[in-house]
């Protein structure tokens, strides 16, 4: 039996207090496979968090694992900045063949650095360079990253209340009010854009998540996205979709914006792109926006070849046909059905649900209840996170590759946790 | 024989014009071992660039490779945000045992995201949070990264001339004038700090590289660093040393500031930290600065366990004794000697040299000459880069693990390239 | 007969191109009395512009003139910074007696400098100091002044498109949509304020004109102002009413906000305050906001005693009883009636009207028409200006002291000019 | 006998706490003539402050008074925005004839609003518009005004420590170190400008006072000003001289920069320009900088005709010949001599002196001593102010028109106050 105290000593003594997830799940994980993680005491946990959407294909997916070990064994280049490598070429070819071309997209691919926030920084920088304008419109409860530029378009005020943080101009608009009868409402935004005396600067771009993950699984309606797209076109603003968490199949299609039928000018991808938890990010841009000078945006880890190798394997394995999309659809219905049952059975307690594809939120009136559900789930062997401005939403991000039985088991654990905490 | 045209087509058609290193070295690399990279035609290149200082222990170092493949084979956790994992614990223990404790440092370790620019963003954010002040002083020709916060303390104006980029207040001071007889001169800085009516805001921190890599291998004298440290203490400013490129042994000791005998309040490390080219970064902070709230700075790739595994192996292999330090010292002398010969033989052509440890710069009067030397080197089988505000400096970053013969061979190629381009 | 060419030579050769009103009315004015100005050729012009609302009591009002000349003749202090003077004391006493006390206001009086923009700068600075917050919400088509702080809350984008101008964060909201059936709509504003994850910073204050003058005589409805006041109270934001142009009786009461029954936290006054065209401004603040340190906001011309003298005379003459208010009301009805006739007679040409008290706008579809009306009026002997985001509104600002006959005459000239330009 | 308590009640109850000069000189002034002010108790005070340099020609100068009363009596236009008026024409003609032409200046004249801070705001705006650049370099202990733009180039940190005040980028350089043997030193500034990798933005302009008044009577040496002028020319930065306090003869010539033989691109004037304490300011600009669009910078009080009238009278009376300049020179020598005696007699107490023309500072080691001297002077019948970053400098600004006897008397009072407070 593991002595937890002894084993976490170095974390509490040496690691900064900024650590957070380990506080919710206080055990030491060592091994993982498919939909499960295992701690060093050998206990199994079903994972409905998957690295905040980074492990859509499950942990240590065997197809990707085989490709990765083979590459490393053969002394393939591991780090290459933005030199040409064989692994990068294979990735670009697969990305074009399985992602861009089938969707009629002619975007160019930029490697902005290894993390999502790098991709957002590059997207903002490019939008500003192309237009010569500074303002970027973003939405309430948006989350785009923690570097200064990305933070300035994020919604969470709490994280930025620090008096020393430079105050960048930011332009926040209300996100879609899904679940209401209200028409997509851009009257105010339109007035600010159209009134010559509004004082509102002509924005370079609008940045949006089609489903806000950290914001609490807020789902924008397709008609809202289309209206936003039309406003962007009419007012010559670039539309940036941040698909870092919702891309790579999470909502049922490779890109989350496919359902709405829009084509963003710039798209950011990261998290599940490498498919194996290895840092990788891309910024996609319409070819006419590719006005970068060589090296104008650079960085060290823009050529993480092991990540290219697993990303390429994932594209071949999951996006060459419609198999995975169908499975996400089925699992999504299964999830929706279970959540509906929970909501029905907790009528009067203020529980509600929302989501699409395989990303779902179960919202409680009180953050305490959501927290209690999370804790109860962990005790029962399920890793699951909360989100939303008050952390009042239990967020379901099962692996896209989970079996119907695994999903059932997890949904059952959640149902019981909700009952336990009533 | 490889048909280059066909093989690079997808790069030129699909990858953004922002790509740059591939323009200097137009071949497709596929394999690497130790001090050499190989392209797909099988040609070998001695590597004096090592991923801009990311591969200090050589390519695919066998000790690290063994540990990594074993970990992956055993389905070790690959991605864990900031949960507790066994691999992270081993890394923290090794980092304390081989890096912090022997140097009498009690800094805490923060995982700010996978890349250097994330580490800098976290350092700046922390300094501002701790002090409640915004201004951060940086130096001419500094380079700290490409996200908005890091860019605001970097020197290169060219990259920021874009009219749409938000203009953050920044406070640039002249870097040390090494190679002159001038005393370390902080008179202006001191006047601005001490005059109550200076209008100069009390800075939160000063951020400095002890050797500016991208800036052209500008070496700060130890007495200059000590004077800077004293000013920081006297005026209650935090001292941040950005050791992303110069740490991990590049200057002869693990940290580049050890020679000066100073202890920075905050240190950033990345590049060679994982030792295998895998993205990893840390921000070190004095314990009394650890005022973060849980999750106040977060991000997806803060638990890249494969990188922890190789980093741990590297610490055990290279920093448990003084072996590597001695070797760096010897190779440094060998390099200095060769460069001295080049400078002597090119007397009157304005060639000069500078450096310490195993980072050296050979400066030419004209950027064209430096560029020609780089090109000639590549033709002869040596990968080497230029740096400096006008790209007029040939920058030598051999692997710390290179043999004396490999180093000789590379220095010989440089010598010939200089002769060829006279 | 005057030779205009010779007489304006020094203006065109020596004065900056920034001059503007002289372009609309190309003659040299030398004398003025009551509702009329006279040029050096002796031609009389009825003045419906009165210095953009600076001469509400007419030109060289005899009551004020007498007091002023007497003061100057007696070698009264002319300039006193913020020392105590007899003239200042009399002004403060009169302001309290005739303005503050009758309206139940206990505001303190601050002398922020001689012009309206100084008063706005002081108001913004105070709101930020009191709350420790930076954001100030303002409205589309607002105009608050031309110094950097005042400009950042003004609506006119055109004036700030200059790439070198520092870009201050600003928060513009749509102004009331008077003349429509829409309910006062603060839904978006409320959402941004109430959603904890909105990213919208908690504002220090809201600054508003009850009637936008430069913006095109946009009249906020009392219920809109009351709703705004309630939002400010509920969200702990200070309400600043900029009454520089609309105060001093222009809308029928001394302050323009009296009709709505609200009590702003901060009020700015200038223009007609001295009553004689002499520069004078005050910022009024609730006593609990008076957290200034002595001298924290200063400036040279905060003690313009001649202006105090005329201001005091004006208060005694016009605000000791309800006489003037009644007259403004009567003249307002007279104006409204005439404009209604014009609108009726130009049915189908897109003419519309708005206003209250003695400030009225006659809006045309095209700026060209408005410009033509202004020009035609001048030719016929009436000085009148245009306003609005496209300068499409003819703006009527007759002296509050004009006679019914003078007003009739001016309205008749406008009517004819509208006909002339059909 | 006056009952002070009763008479100042309305000030302390109604005026904001921001009032400051009245705290130093707690009496109610009512009348003034020449070099003297009189309080309502009939007590005379010699005035060595003259409205912070606003009354260079003395109080209620009879020549100006006559012109002003005549103008007002004849119902001359008092307020005209930027329309053509006879009074303005006379002012422009006189300004050209007596100020610009004799000095070989071809600057154009802009009326930016009635106060100095308006003139500075216009100067900064113009420099940014012309160059398209934002950064403006200013100096330690500079004071340029209290509106947001002017404040951002002022030195006093204390006034801007308010957390809510928008933080504008500002670039402060050490002012000349007069009274030392140091060569004018622009090495740092030059390095920041010339190093392409400095990160220092190319400034639009440099703004400087040749003698810092509020900063503590810091006198820039002519060679320092010339060196600064050369740097501006070499690096294509506009040179703005803020002559608001030091212009209009204060340093012995009309402009303070004449001694150095430089010609600034932009000059701001205010304070003593009207000569009678009436608000008036101008911004002078080289003709090629006159790129303003009509009305691009506007404001209400840009046509204060009574001020034009007194300004014109002052130019005719004092700048048509060299009489006044000679007198300032003589009075300056007289002052210098007296101060030298004070410094000699207080040897060892850390007293020092500086100045030129008729602006002089007597610096003490401790602010308390300076404050005591000021208080003692007031008790003895002399109004005099302190300045400097710690208010440690007694500042002498006698009327330029004072008699030798008046000056002697004042200097004698200061001498005694110094002795009294030893």
Image (cartoon, coloured by chain):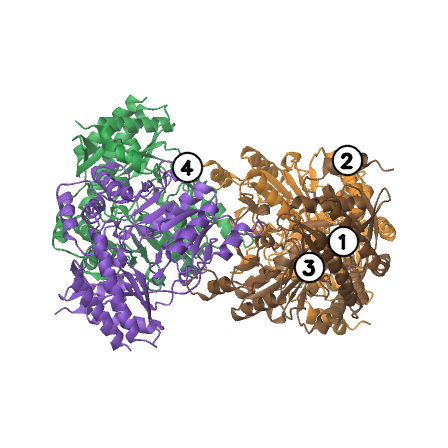
Chain colours: A purple, B green, C brown, D orange
Quadrant showing the C terminus of chain B: top left
Disc 3 with disc 2 on a shared chain: yes
Secondary structure at numbered mark 4 = loop
Query: Is residue C234 shown left or right of residue A226?
Result: right
Secondary structure at numbered mark 2 = helix
Q: Distance between the residues labelled 1 and 3?
A: 17 Å
Q: Using a 10 Å C-alpha cutoff, classify the residue at mark 4 as few (fewer than 14 neighbours), some (14 to 19) or many (20 or more).
A: few
Residue C50 numbered tag: 1
Q: How far apart are marks 3 and 4 (CA)?
A: 75 Å
Disc 3 with disc 4 on a shared chain: no
Disc 4 with disc 1 on a shared chain: no
Q: Distance between the residues labelled 4 and 1?
A: 69 Å
The answer to whether mark 4 and mark 1 are in CB contact below 8 A is no
Q: Distance between the residues labelled 2 and 1?
A: 26 Å
**Residue that label 3 marks:** C355
Quadrant showing the N terminus of chain B: top left
Give the label, 4 or 1, closer to the camera: 1
């Amino acid at each position: 039996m593991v002595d937890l105290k002894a084993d976490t000593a170095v974390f509490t003594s040496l690691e900064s207090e900024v650590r957070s997830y380990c506080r919710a799940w206080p055990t030491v994980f060592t091994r993982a496979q498919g939909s499960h993680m295992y701690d060093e005491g050998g206990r199994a946990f079903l994972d409905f968090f998957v690295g905040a959407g980074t492990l859509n294909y499950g942990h240590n997916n065997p197809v990707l694992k085989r490709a990765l070990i083979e590459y490393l064994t053969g002394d393939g280049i591991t780090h290459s900045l933005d030199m040409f490598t064989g692994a990068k070429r294979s990735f670009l070819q697969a990305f074009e063949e399985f992602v861009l071309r089938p969707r009629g997209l002619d975007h160019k691919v930029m490697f902005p650095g290894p993390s999502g926030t790098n991709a957002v920084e590059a997207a903002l920088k490019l939008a500003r360079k192309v237009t010569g304008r500074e303002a970027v419109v973003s939405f309430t409860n948006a989350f785009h990253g923690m570097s200064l530029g990305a933070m300035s378009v994020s919604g969470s005020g709490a994280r930025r209340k620090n008096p020393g943080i430079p105050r960048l101009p930011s332009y926040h608009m209300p996100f879609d009010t899904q679940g209401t009868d209200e028409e997509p409402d851009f009257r105010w935004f339109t007035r600010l854009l159209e009134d010559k005396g509004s004082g509102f600067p002509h924005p370079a771009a609008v940045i949006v998540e089609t489903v806000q993950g950290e914001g609490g699984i807020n789902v924008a309606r397709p008609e809202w996205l289309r209206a936003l797209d039309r406003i962007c076109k009419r007012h010559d603003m670039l539309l940036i979709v941040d698909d870092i968490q919702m891309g790579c199949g999470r909502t049922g299609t490779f890109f989350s914006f496919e359902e709405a039928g829009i084509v963003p000018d710039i798209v950011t991808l990261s998290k599940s792109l490498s498919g194996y938890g290895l840092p990788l990010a891309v910024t996609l841009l319409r070819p006419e926006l590719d006005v970068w000078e060589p090296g104008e945006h650079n960085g060290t880890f823009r050529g993480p070849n092991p990540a290219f190798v697993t990303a390429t394997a994932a594209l071949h394995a999951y996006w060459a046909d419609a198999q995975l999309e169908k499975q996400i659809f089925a699992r999504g219905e299964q999830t929706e059905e279970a959540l509906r049952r929970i909501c029905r059975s907790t009528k009067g307690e203020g529980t509600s649900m929302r989501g699409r594809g395989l990303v779902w939120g179960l919202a409680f009136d009180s953050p305490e209840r959501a927290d209690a559900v999370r804790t109860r789930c962990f005790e029962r062997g399920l890793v699951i996170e909360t989100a939303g401005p008050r952390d009042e939403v239990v967020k379901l991000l099962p692996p896209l590759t989970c079996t119907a039985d695994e999903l059932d088991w997890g949904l059952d654990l959640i149902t019981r946790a909700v009952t336990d905490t009533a």
